[in-house]
Amino acid sequence: MSNTIIANALVHNFTIKDKKESRINGGLVGVEAYGQWKSALEVAHEAFYKYERSKLSLANGTVKDINAEKKNAVAAFKSILALVGEVNGVSLETSVEAMDSVSKYAIKDVEKLAGKALTLKSELDNLRTQLNNVHNGMSEDYVSNLEKQYEAKAEELRLEKKKQGSAVKSTTITSYAAFASGLETRLAKAIEKQDAQSYEEIVAEREAKKAANRAKAKARRDANKSAKTSNKPVETVAA
């Protein structure tokens, strides 16, 4: 097991069901250690979000290179793992695959109203504000009319939301609290898994993964080489 206070706190918190109580804090690890941890997570939160956004841009062809974002994300990930320390004589896995398992907590999909639905939402908000400002000096008929307008507008918006094109999907950065909670839970699981293995088992597993990744990389290179060769124009020999 790791002797670092951060690693021990992560595993301890993993057993607590209350999400607010299961987060690393100054009372649990000390002010100095918590300050280092929070600082590392804040940097990672931003770096991971930019990395995840760049992966989406790469997938849809908007950009051709994400090396800068990836480099920053890897550096942030390694800073976090350095604070966690070694578990059974080996640090937690620093591969891109391992990083991807936690960087995903920095981004989320959201739906935003568009078109008529957005207009209706604005009108509904305005009516809600008027109702919140109702006071005793207003006539019952006026207040009743406002309430009817609000109910009718709410129903109209509900029906409009069911229509195609009423909302557009996009991605945004998660809250720091949600990011930290997801990352700390994931790290706790990784620590427990590695703690159940011997040093020799951990090393053997890492070497097997490296070998598999090398084989996949070679297969990709060979496939690309084969594709280029097959597309090469056939040379004709003059008689």
Image (tube, helix red, strand yellow):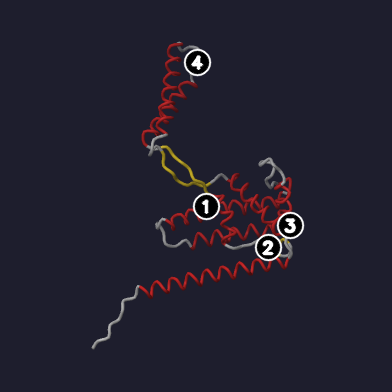
Q: Which residue is mark 2?
A: 91
- Tell me which label, 3 or 4, sits earlier in the chain: 3
- Residue 237 quadrant: bottom left
- Tell me which label, 1 or 3, sits earlier in the chain: 3
Taking the spot 45% from the left edge, 14% from the top edge, the residue there is: 144
Taking the spot 47% from the left edge, 47% from the top edge, the residue there is: 171
Instruction: Name the kind of residue labelled 2 in the image.
Output: Ser
Q: Could you tell me which secondary element the residue under label 3 belongs to?
A: loop
Q: Which residue is mark 4?
A: 135
Q: Which residue is mark 1?
A: 49
Residue 143 percent coordinates (x, y): 45, 15
Which of the labelled discs sits on residue 4, or is there none?
3
Instruction: Name the kind of residue labelled 4 in the image.
Output: His
Contact, CB < 8 Å: mark 2 with mark 3?
no
Residue 183 percent coordinates (x, y): 62, 51
Q: Along the horizontal axis of the image, is 213 left or right of 4?
A: left
Taking the spot 57% from the left edge, 50% from the top edge, the residue there is: 105
Q: Along the horizontal axis of the image, is 43 left or right of 161?
A: right
Q: Could you tell me which secondary element the residue under label 1 belongs to?
A: helix
- Residue 191 quadrant: bottom right
Contact, CB < 8 Å: mark 1 with mark 3?
no
Q: Quadrant of the C terminus?
A: bottom left
Q: Quadrant of the N terminus?
A: bottom right
